[in-house]
Image: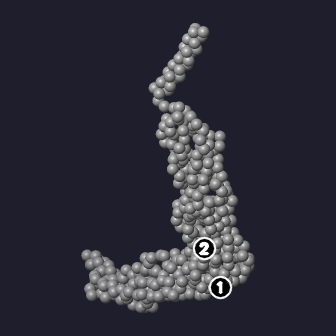
């Protein structure tokens, strides 16, 4: 019995001597954030840029205690929590397109990468620029434990700005001072004269100025490149291009892109950012008939006159008019020369028209067209122009009853004459 009591006392003492479990508590330290651009940080004027930024947390915990009866905190003081990052342009010629990004938490010794989309201004001058990177986060400032089973976490909010340096390299940038179209109308070819200035910070060598079709614009370059040689900073050059306008365009302004390809100071071939200009396009060249309906007589061949007017906005050259004769008309002389016509100018065409004797007396519409050469000597054909023709009855024509009466009287006359000759012979 005494042995059992002794054993129980030994076990009880062993339990009382068990080690006390401790909880780690940090009383010092905070996040230490830094940032840098990863990869490319040099961009050209007019370029769409993606800037990769690495945010690093170098913060450490400076004090650590292990004690009993303390609740272990959920976060460490050197952890940056709820990190939000955004980039501002500052005074740089940059447009930032990316909104603030929520990056989550960054523990001590950790990092994250964010990517920001930006646009470099077309007229940006060469040099280095600082972009402020704004970082907002919270960290565990201190804890308060009022009871053995309750702890309060007190967080501190930090707003931090870190300058990031980008470099804009020198490049030729252009400003189109003047864009003058010549004889540029819907469905034709014409010329485009440009006067361009180098507003950039670099001298261009062996430069070629190109005009480029803008998307689905109906203005389509035919001769798209002009070699200008040296294109110094502040210099001005003039270029002339041949362009075409598709037939489905309207009378309005359409875009065209202009760029310069040149050799830079390092001997590399570079193309400047495109510069978009608006080109006014004139209306389609068209003709109208200004004369009234041509009058023809059924059963006859008649020369008719038709007056045509150039209703377009550009001159036409070596114009020829042609009429299409269909039943009840015929024509062996259906083409007339109109010559050169300025906008608003008129000319007269003459056609010989044969009309069927059975043609019904009424007004007919005959199709005609005008073939001409544009300012570049290209052959063009106008849309169909209607020519009105009025058919009137002939002197011997009429209704079927009138024709029958005429035949009756002719026959009666012949019979009377025959009867007269027969009577006179009998008298002799």
Looking at the image, do the residues carrying marks 2 and 1 touch, with CB atoms under 8 Å apart?
A: no
Q: Is disc 2 placed on a helix, strand or loop?
A: strand
Image side of residue 70 versus residue 275, left or right: left
Q: Is residue 220 above or below residue 41?
A: above
Identify the mark at residue 179; answer none if there is no mark. 2
- The mark that comes first in sequence, 2 or 1, is 2
The location of residue 121, given as percent across then percent down, is: 55, 80
Name the residue that disc number 1 marks: 234
Which residue shows up at 32% across the image and 80% down it? 15
Q: Quadrant of the N terminus?
A: bottom left
Q: Using the rendered image of the protein, determine whether residue 220 is visible from the camera's viewpoint.
A: no
Q: Using the rendered image of the protein, determine whether residue 256 is visible from the camera's viewpoint.
A: yes
Which is more toward the observer, 246 or 108?
246
Q: Is residue 338 above or below residue 241?
A: above
User: Residue lying furthest front in this view?
Assistant: 428
Which residue shows up at 46% across the image and 84% down it? 134
Q: Quadrant of residue 155?
A: bottom left
Q: Is disc 1 placed on a helix, strand or loop?
A: loop
Which residue shows up at 51% across the image and 42% down it? 390
The location of residue 420, given as percent across then percent down, is: 55, 15
For the image, the number of numbered tags is 2
């Amino acid at each position: 019995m005494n042995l059992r009591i002794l054993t129980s006392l030994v076990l009880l003492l062993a339990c009382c001597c068990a080690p006390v479990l401790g909880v780690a508590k940090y009383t010092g330290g905070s996040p230490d954030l830094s940032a840098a651009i990863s990869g490319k940080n040099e961009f050209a004027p007019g370029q769409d840029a993606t800037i990769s930024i690495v945010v690093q947390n170098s913060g450490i915990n400076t004090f650590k205690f292990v004690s009993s009866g303390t609740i272990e905190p959920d976060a460490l003081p050197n952890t940056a929590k709820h990190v939000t990052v955004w980039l501002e342009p500052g005074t740089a010629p940059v447009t930032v397109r990316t909104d603030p990004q929520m990056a989550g938490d960054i523990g001590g010794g950790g990092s994250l990468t964010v990517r920001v989309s930006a646009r470099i201004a077309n007229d940006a001058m060469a040099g280095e620029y600082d972009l402020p990177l704004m970082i907002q986060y919270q960290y565990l400032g201190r804890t308060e434990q009022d009871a053995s089973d309750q702890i309060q976490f007190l967080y501190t909010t930090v707003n931090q700005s870190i300058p990031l340096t980008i470099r804009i390299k020198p490049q030729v940038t252009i400003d189109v001072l003047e864009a003058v179209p010549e004889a540029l109308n819907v469905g034709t070819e014409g010329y485009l004269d440009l006067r361009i200035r180098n507003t950039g910070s670099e001298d261009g060598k062996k430069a070629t100025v190109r005009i480029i079709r803008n998307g689905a614009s109906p203005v389509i370059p035919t001769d798209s490149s002009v070699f200008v040689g040296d294109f110094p900073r502040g210099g001005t050059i003039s270029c002339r291009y041949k362009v075409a306008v598709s037939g489905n365009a309207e009378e309005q302004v359409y875009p065209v892109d202009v760029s310069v390809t040149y050799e830079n100071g390092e001997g590399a071939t570079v193309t400047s950012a495109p510069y978009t200009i608006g080109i006014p396009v004139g209306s389609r060249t068209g003709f109208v008939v200004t004369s009234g309906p041509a009058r023809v007589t059924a059963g006859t061949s008649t020369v008719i006159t038709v007056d045509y007017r150039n209703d377009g906005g550009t001159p036409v050259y070596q114009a020829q008019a042609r009429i299409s004769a269909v039943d009840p008309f015929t024509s062996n002389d259906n083409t007339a020369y109109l010559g050169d016509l300025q906008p608003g100018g008129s000319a007269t065409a003459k056609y010989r028209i044969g009309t069927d004797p059975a043609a019904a007396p009424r007004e007919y519409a005959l199709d005609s067209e005008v073939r001409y050469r544009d300012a570049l000597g290209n052959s063009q054909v106008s849309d169909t122009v209607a020519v009105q023709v009025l058919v009137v009855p002939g002197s011997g024509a009429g209704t079927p009853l009138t024709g029958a009466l005429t035949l009756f009287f002719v026959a009666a006359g012949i019979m009377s004459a025959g009867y007269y000759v027969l009577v006179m012979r009998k008298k002799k």
